[in-house]
Amino acid sequence: MSILRTAATAALLAVTLAACSALPTTTSAPSAATVATPPVLLVSLDGFRPDYLELGITPNLNRLAAGGVRAEWMNPSYPTLTFPNHYTVVTGLRPDHHGIIHNTISDPELGEFSLGNRAAVADGRWWGGEPIWVGAENAGLKTATMFWPGSEAEIRGVRPTRWLPFDESLPADARVDMMLGWLGEPAATRPRFATLYFEHLDKAAHAHSFDSPEAHAAVAKLDRAIGRLIEGLQQRGPVNLVIVSDHGMAAAEPGHSIAIEDMVAPTDATAITHGQAVGFAPLPGRTGAAEKSLLGAHEHYECWRKDAVPAAWQFGSHPRVPAIVCQMHEGWDARPQATLARRNSTTTRGAHGYAPEAGSMRSLFIAHGPAFVPGTTLPAFDNVDVYPLLARLIGIQPAANDGDIDSLAPALRARP
């Protein structure tokens, strides 16, 4: 995601950061009300594989995991892409149910959606379900979101109390300081629920592969940011901290891209999405020809009608899902012919969007705070289960969702 900061946003950030820098290094003891109702902070480390914790470069994350809760891994939803899974975490709905079925979407009424389409991203009509900040606001609780997908739109007529348009130029430490400023405010204005997002690892891994020195440097940088966050939170009273990733990352070797046009003739079908999860819309009168070319197993991918996608993926019923869905094999992607020269370079890249059961696609879950039983390791669970956990931590009734809090029950302290 690459979005230019507007002048208004720049001014807002400058004022907020100035306020953060003026915060004292210590604060007075938290009030009884603060202790009784700790805020919830949801943090995303985009593209963070759980096995990064075994590299010896994440002391702060490992300390949180050891003193709190760690899942063996968390299963992403299909497709294993950024926007669909971030929105699943905060709604508890599969992408097939909330409608953000890809990073790139076509809708006959709304038009085209993509990460860089500012008008679409800010249009609440794209975003189905009820994200956790909407439920919290409707319950009279203040919320603050920093760059979480979906938080720039007015959804069901509601926005977070505080939100910012995505700005990749804002450094990680500045994001932490801004969040600490919000969480350090008096109870009357402090958010009860907040989100914090970091894209740095995903960006480095895409450019250099998941196990490159650049990716490892990004992992270490994020861990330092988490350390800064922990230190600041310790001065602000108890917080229930939940750290997740949206998906993992695999290696895509040079030459492992194929042309969309080689999959099906452009006179038979239009590619709605590219990359690892590819969708096609047959042209009028050409459905039979398109299906003949696409359906079934191929050397580097497999395709199905939308109603025959593997059942375990729970995908294919939403009207925005293209008529034919193709899943690339791990390490491969499909792009328009015009872009292949760039994709098939001599450099190994990082990629995601593969089958959610692939080990490389596993995502991270760590939790720490007064609501959690220290030293708990959970077996793998689906990322839809995070939403009912958040609702319980905040103290609101969850909206309809696909999750099940029972998978996290062993990690939760009994209610007082």
Image (cartoon, rainbow, N blue to C red):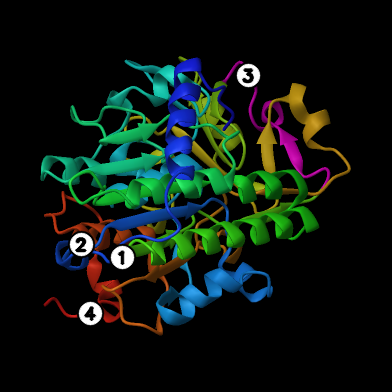
Relative to residue 219, is residue 151 drawn left or right?
A: left
Q: In the image, what residue type sits under mark 1?
A: Gly
Residue 84 location in percent, x, y? 42, 42
State the extent of the magenta-drawn residues as a range: 254-268
Above or below — where is 6 with respect to 211?
above
Towards the viewer: 245 or 222: 222
Residue holding disc 1: 237
* Secondary structure category for the residue under label 3: loop
In whole angstroms, how far apart are the C-alphas of marks 2 and 1?
A: 7 Å
**Between marks 3 and 4, how big is the CA–CA gap?**
57 Å
Question: Which residue is outermost to the bottom?
Answer: 375
| Residue at (40, 21) in percent of width and height | 120
Which amino acid type is shown beneath numbered disc 3? Pro
Answer with left or right where residue 136 lies relative to residue 411: left
Label 4 is placed on what type of residue? Arg
Q: Is residue 30 magenta?
A: no
Which residue lies under the disc numbered 3? 266
Task: Please name the residue that numbered disc 4 is placed on.
Answer: 413
| x and y, in percent, of residue 126 in the image | 32, 27
Residue at 49% over, 44% down: 21
- Which residue is disc 2 drawn over? 34
Residue 149: percent from the left, percent from the top?
A: 41, 38
Q: Earlier in the sequence, mark 2 or mark 4?
A: 2
- Marks 3 and 4 close (CB-CB < 8 Å): no
Whether residue 364 appears in this view of the structure is: yes
Which residue is rendered at x = 20% and y = 57% of the image?
394
Q: Nearer the viewer, mark 2 or mark 3?
A: 2
How far apart are the two marked residues, 2 and 3, measured between alpha carbons?
60 Å
User: Quarter of the image containing the C terminus?
Assistant: bottom left
Q: 10 Å neighbourhood of mark 4: few (<14), some, or many (≥20)?
A: few
User: Which SS class for mark 2?
Assistant: helix
